[in-house]
Image (spheres, rainbow, N blue to C red):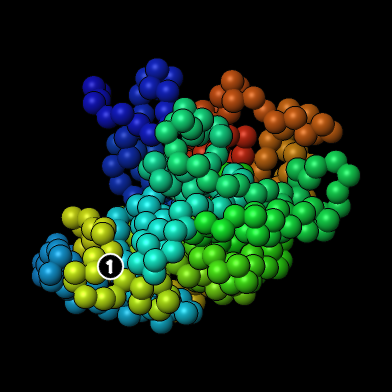
Amino acid sequence: MRSFVWHPYTQMNDWKKFDVISKGKGMWLYDSQGNAMMDGVASMWCNVWGHSNRELTNSMIRQSKKLQHSSLFNLTNDKAEELAEKLVKLAPEMYRVFYSDDGSTAMEISAKMALQYWNNIGEKRTRFVSLENGYHGDTIGAMSLGYVPLFFSKFKSTLFPVLRTPTPNKYRIPKGYSFEDYQEFCLEKIEQTFSKNNNIAAFVMESGAQIAGGVVIYPKGFQKKISKMCKKYNVLFILDEIATGFGRLGSIVEYQTQESTPDIVSFGKMLSGGYLPLAATLANKKVYDSFLGEYKDMKHFFHGHTFTGNPLACATALTNISLYKKHNLISKIKRREAQIRSRVEEISNLGLVGDVRHKGMLMGIELVSNKKTKTPISPQKRLPQKVFIEAKKHGIYQRTLGPIVMIVPPLAISEK
Ligand SMILES: Cc1ncc(COP(=O)(O)O)c(C=O)c1O
C-alpha cells in the first residue's frame, strides 16, 4: 500500500510498511487481515476501557447528533460546563478549568498562565525550574520545560532556558550517596535554586512519576516536600498529570496521593478514556483571580484554540469519569498492580534487565548492556524496533522509550 503518512519518532527508511489497524475491540487491535494484537501501550498511554467500549461510543454518538463543536469564544456549551464542574470537584484546591486538545498544549498553557500571573500582579518573574529528565510534550515550550536529551538535543539552541535540578532515580544514584542522602541532595538543589534566584515563576514536574524520561517513581514525600518549598519561596507549583492522573498510578488525582497541592495542574490522555483529543489545565483561585480586572487592564488570559472545550470530547470525558465509579476501576487497578508486582523478581532476573520500576498500571523495564556496570544500551542498537517486532510475534503491541520497555496497558485490562 502506498502511504503518504509521516510517522512520529520514526526512521521512515526502516519501516517499509506498517500494520494497518482497522478495528479495535476491548484490549485488542486488529489489522486489515484480521490479526489481533493486544494493545500493550494503551494506544500511547491513554486508553482506559479498551476499544469500542459501548458506553463511550454510545455517548459519542448521542453527543455528535446534538452538537459536535461550538466555540468557547463568547459562548459556552453544557458539556464543557459540566466537565469543568466535575474536574474542579475532583481536584482539591482547583478553581477553574482551561481546555485544550493535547498534553503538550496543556503544558504550554500552564507555562503561559504562570508567566501571565506574575505579569498581572506586577512582578518580574520569568524563569522556570524543572526536574532533569522530565517530559512535558513535544512543542517548543513543553520541550523547554521538560528536557529529555535523547529526544530534544536537536532543538536545544531554540528552547528557552530552564533551571534544572536532579531527579532521585534509585537505580542511578551517584557514587557515595545512599538513596536517602541523594533525595536530600535533590531537595537541597531545589531550595538553593529558589533562594539564589528571585525571578522564578514556577517549578514544573510530572506528578507521582516521570514516565517518558525513564519511568522514575518518586520516593515517598519527595513531591510533598517540593510542594511545601514552593509555598515557602512563593514559587508557583505546576504539576503535569497528563500521563499519571486518572488512574495510571492508582489514583484519579495523583497529587492528592502525594499529599501535595499545585497552583496549576494539567490532565489529558485518559481524561476522555483515550477516545478523543482533550486536555485540561486547572488553576487555583489565587492564579485565576489575578486574571480578573477591567478590560483596559489587559489582564485576561491571552490564549485560545479552535477546539477549546469541544463538546463531543467533553461529553466523552464525562461518560468516562462516570464509569470509574460504576466499574470500581481504582480497586481493580490496585489488584492489577499487585499482579504486576508479583512478576517483578522474575523479570529482574532476565539477562539484559538492569532495573524494573513500577506503580499502578505502569512498569518500566530498563535494559542495560552490562548489569554490573549498568551501562545503557546504545541507541544505535535500535532497541525500539527490535522489541516491537519481537513482541508482535507474541501478539502484543509493545514499545520501548530509549532503553526502557514500557508496560502501560489499558487501565481496565483483566487479570487474564
Ligand atoms: C507527562 C506528559 N506530559 C505531556 C505529554 C504530552 O502529551 P501529548 O502527547 O498529548 O501532547 C505527555 C505525553 O506522553 C506526557 O507523558
Residue at x-position 22% and y-position 55%: 305
Nearer to me, 416 or 242: 242
Extreme top residue here? 13
Task: State whether residue 83 is above or below residue 110.
Answer: below
- On the question of residue 257 being in view, the answer is no
Residue at x-position 55% and y-position 73%: 261
Nearer to me, 179 or 322: 179
Nearer to me, 31 or 188: 188
- Mark 1, Cα crowd under 10 Å, few <14 / some 14-19 / many 20+, is some
Is 154 placed left or right of 171 in the picture?
left
Q: Quadrant of residue 6?
A: top left
- x then y, percent, for residue 84: 31, 75
Q: Which residue is mark 1?
A: 299
Is 187 placed left or right of 266 in the picture?
right
Is 392 placed left or right of 120 in the picture?
right
- x then y, percent, for residue 212: 54, 45
| Quarter of the image with the N terminus in it | top left
Residue at x-position 41% and y-position 82%: 89
- On the question of residue 347 being in view, the answer is yes
Q: Quadrant of residue 4?
A: top left
Residue at x-position 59% and y-position 20%: 380
- x then y, percent, for residue 91: 46, 76
| Quarter of the image with the C terminus in it | bottom right
Nearer to me, 372 or 241: 241
- Judging from the image, what secondary structure is the residue with disc 1 in? loop
Q: Hey, what amino acid is under mark 1? A: Lys
Task: State whether residue 38 is above or below residue 394.
Answer: below
- x then y, percent, for residue 415: 57, 61
Q: Quadrant of residue 307?
A: bottom left
